[in-house]
Image: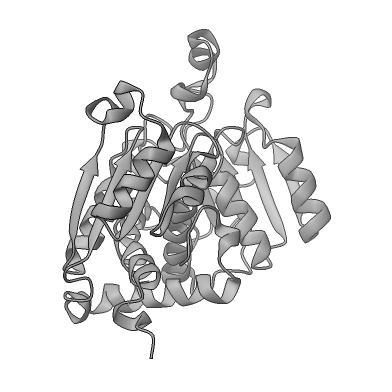
Amino acid sequence: MRHLIEPEDFSLEEIEELVDTGLKMYADPKAYNKACENKILASLFFEPSTRTKFSFDSAMMRLGGNVIGFSDADTSSAKKGESLADTIRVMGYYADLIVMRHPKEGAPKLASQYSSIPVVNAGDGGHQHPTQTLTDLITIKKYKGTISGHTVAFCGDLKYGRTVHSLIRTLARFGTKKFMLVSPEELKLPSTLKRQLVDKYGVELVEVPYIEDVIDSIDILYMTRIQKERFFNEADYLKLKNSFKLTREKLKTAKSDMIVMHPLPRVNEIAYDVDDDPRAVYFEQSEMGVYVRMALIAKLLEVGPYVRS
């Protein structure tokens, strides 16, 4: 039995296989529409979600399976004080796979220790978001041809952004050697993560205050929103929320084959007139998340292309 709590739970070979399988499913989804017949996914979202929850639901249904669960912890027995461990133990009798989002860092790891079925971390606080990383990687491979070998800029909330934390570590594992970090002083990438990237993977980190400083030299621009829910007081959030905004004007000097990504939701960090630019792939990125999650479900349940011989 396997769990996916952080990207490091899978080898680089397994991650690339998931990406390639997701691309095959994208090309011919009907070939896999019975892979999860009689299988049930438990979707346990203790924190709000649109894309992650519904893309997992869609992925399971496209594989022919069924979905149970909740998108509001107040509708579960957690509101009555039930422990996470007990919830997870019970779900093992009702489903074949658990997908879980939780506001507390480490909660999915704890869940995996009590679970009799595979557990997937769908985001835990500001910590990790491994299936968003898979979504990002399949998008990069689709539009850039390879996962590694690109100069990547991350812009926005790099301190609390779990999508950034998961993706930058994984790209470093794949051999990406240079990252541009664009953020306000208050939202810089955590120093512990920076040390890990430099010491373990030998990457070069270039910190700059404005998108314009790097826009002409990058292959991928990964935008993120300033996350209100990660702040302890509203005044700090209001001060920073409009710090960075990508506009059509700022894209004028960007490479013609550069791509703009965003895990969404967007608040106001990307102007709407950027949507029509062919380099903007964030909605397509959201679509690709369905197919790589289909591949992940198939792998964890050992069905479809992952059936054991």
Viewer-proximal residue among 95 and 286: 95
Q: Is residue 294 visible?
A: yes
- The residue at the point 83 percent across, 54 percent down is 199
Viewer-proximal residue among 209 and 254: 209
Q: Is residue 92 left or right of residue 130?
A: left
Q: Quadrant of residue 118?
A: bottom left
Q: Is residue 139 left or right of residue 41?
A: right
Residue 254 locus on image (x, y percent): 53, 53
Q: Is residue 219 visible?
A: no
Q: Quadrant of residue 288?
A: bottom left
Viewer-proximal residue among 93 and 201: 93
- The residue at the point 39 percent across, 68 percent down is 300
Residue 223 locus on image (x, y percent): 49, 42
Q: Is residue 12 left or right of residue 140?
A: right
Residue most extreme to the bottom: 309
Q: Is residue 258 left or right of residue 58?
A: right
Residue most extreme to the right: 199
Q: Quadrant of residue 88?
A: top left
Where 194 sits versus 98, above or below? above
Viewer-proximal residue among 75 and 217: 75
Residue 106 locus on image (x, y percent): 55, 40
Where 167 sits versus 148, above or below? above
Residue 176 locus on image (x, y percent): 67, 63
Where 70 sits versus 121, above or below? above
Quadrant, the C terminus: bottom left
Where 166 sits versus 270, above or below? below
